[in-house]
Image (spheres, rainbow, N blue to C red):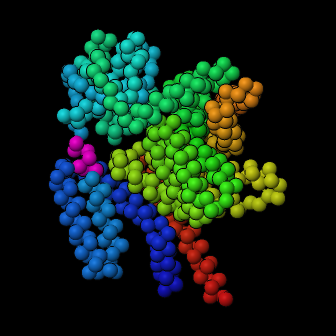
Amino acid sequence: MNIRRHIFADMYRKNLTRSPFVFICIALIVGVTVSRITPLTLYVLPALGIIGISAVIAIVLSIKIPVIQSAVLWFWFFVFGFCFLKAYNSSFYELFGSHTIEAEIINAPQEKPKTYKCEILTSNPKTKSIVYIQKDSLSAQLCMGDLIQLSGTFNEIENTAESTFDYKAYLENKHIFSQAYIPAKHWEKIGHHTSLQSIAIEWRKKMVTQLTDNPLLHGSSSTLAALVFGDTSLLESGIIQAYSATGAMHILSVSGLHVGIIAGMVLFLLSFIPQRFRLLKIFIALTCIWLYAFVTGLVPPVFRAAAMFSIISIGSCLNRSASMYNSLAVAAVVSIIMEPNCVVDIGFQLSYLAVISIAYFGNTIQKLLHFENKIYAYIWGIVAVSIAVQIITLPITMYYFAVVPSYTLLTNIVVVPLSFVVVLLCVATLIIGSIPLIGAGLAWLLNYSCEYLDHVISSIASFPYAQIPVSVSKVGLVLMLFLVLCSMIVLDYRRELRIVRMIEEE
C-alpha cells in the first residue's frame, strides 16, 4: 500500500512539474462547466470583486500554509473560471421581435441560394443574431467588418427535424438566440470597422480567388479552398456528405492537422540551419505558422493549433522538448480567456482530445506490432494513430452526431498521406505558380491529386454500412470518458511501477 501511495504521489508531482498549465486548464474548464449548470446570475462588478478577494485569500493561504499551495491555486482558477463565465455571459442580451438596429457583420457572409447569411453583433445592448439578407448586387459586396442598419423581425432559432445535431444549443453557446430575414430595401451599409480578423478573411478570399481563377484547377478548387484555407462555401453538398460519412471531415476543417503539416515542413527546412542562428530559426518558424493561420482567417481552431505549435516550435529550435500536454493546455487557456463558452464547442473538444489521444495512446498502440518492412511499418503507424485518436473522440462523435463512420481506419490510411501531399503542392503552387512551366506542372499535379482524393472519399462513402446509427446519452458519454480516464491512470501507474521495480532490482 505504501508503494502504491508513493507511486501515485510521484505521478502527481511529475505531472505538476512537467505540465503546470494542465492543472490550470483543468481548473478553468471545471469552473466554467460548473458555472454553466448553476442557475445563478453574476454581473461584471460582483464577479471581479469575488475574483479579487479570492486571489488575496489564495495568496495569503499559499504563503502561510505552503503544503496546500497547489490545492489553493487550483481552487482559485476554478473560482476564476466560474465567475469569468458568469460575467461574460451577463454582458449579452437576447433580441426578439421587430427592430431597427445598427450592427456589425462579425463573420464572412455565406452565400445561400437566395440570401447571404451574416452573423451580426450590436452594442448597447450587446446582442448577436443571424440575418439572411436578400441576394442582390449590393448584398454581394458585404464583407466581415461592415456596419449596417437594418429592419426586420427576429424570431427564435429552431432545430430541423432531419438533423440529430442540436443546432439551437450550438448557437446559444455563441450567444446567438434569434434570426431574421432582411429584404433588399430594408438595410443599408453605414460604415466599416477594420479588425485583424477582417483583414485575414480578405486575405483568405484573395488566396481562394487565386485557386478558383487557375484554369488548371477547375476540378478541385472548391476542395482545395476548404482543405487548405478552411473556406467550405464553395463545396457541393455531395462532397460534404461523402467526407462526413467516411469520418474525414477533419480534413476539410483547417485545424491541428494542417498547421502541423506546415510547422513540420518549416522545422524540417530549418534543421539545416546551424544552431547558433536559433533566434532566427524561431522567428522564421513563428512567422510561417502565424502567416498560415492569418491566411486561413484566424478562425478559432487554427488559432488554437497555431498557439500550440508555436510553443512546440520554440522548444524544437532551442533543442528542448516541450511537453505536448503543457503546450495544449497553454493554447486551451488562451482560447478559454478569449471565449469561455468554447469548452462546450464540439470543435474545441475534438481538436484537443484528438491530440491528447494520439499523444497518450499512439506510441503504446504502435509498439504492439513491429514490422521490418518500412511500407508495412508506415501503414501500421497510420492505423495506430487512427485507432488512438478514436479512443477519446469516438464517444464525443457518437454523442453529438449519433452515427459511427465504419471505414475510418481505411479512410485515414489513404486520406492522411494524400492530404499531406495536397497541402504541400497547394502551398508550392501559390508561391511559385507564376513560373511558366514549373507552375503549370505543379497545378496539374495538384489538380490530379485533389481529384483523386475526392474520388477515394466518394468511393469509400458508397460502401455498404458506411455509417452506423447509434444513440448515446449524457450519462453514457460521461461513463465512456470516465473509463478512458481510468485506463490512462492505469497505464501511467503500470509505467511508474515498472520503473520502481527496475530501480529496486538494481
Residue at far right of view? 373
Q: State the image coordinates of residue 415 (x, y, percent, origin top left).
A: 67, 39
Q: State the image coordinates of residue 280 (x, y, percent, origin top left).
A: 57, 54
Q: Quadrant of residue 288?
A: top right
Q: Quadrant of residue 317?
A: bottom right
Q: Is residue 361 visible?
A: no
Q: State the image coordinates of residue 79 (x, y, percent, origin top left).
A: 27, 61
Question: Mainly helix, strand or loop, the magenta region?
Answer: helix
Instruction: Reply above or below: 483 against 463.
Output: below
Instruction: Reply above or below: 129 against 410.
Output: above
- Residue drawn at x 72%, y 30% as measured from the top left: 442
Q: Is residue 25 visible?
A: yes
- The answer to whether residue 433 is magenta is no
Q: State the image coordinates of residue 178 (x, y, percent, origin top left).
A: 29, 29
- Residue drawn at x 49%, y 86% as measured from the top left: 2
- Residue drawn at x 22%, y 33% as measured from the top left: 123
- The answer to whether residue 88 is magenta is yes
Q: Describe residue 239's horizontal placement relative to residue 179 as left or right.
A: right
Q: Quadrant of residue 77?
A: bottom left
Count of numbered labels shown in the rendering = 0
Q: Nearer the viewer, residue 122 or 506?
A: 122
In magenta, the rendered stretch is 85-91
- Residue drawn at x 33%, y 23% as measured from the top left: 131
Instruction: Reply above or below: 293 against 102.
Output: below
Image quarter where the C terminus lies is bottom right
Q: Nearer the viewer, residue 308 or 234?
A: 308
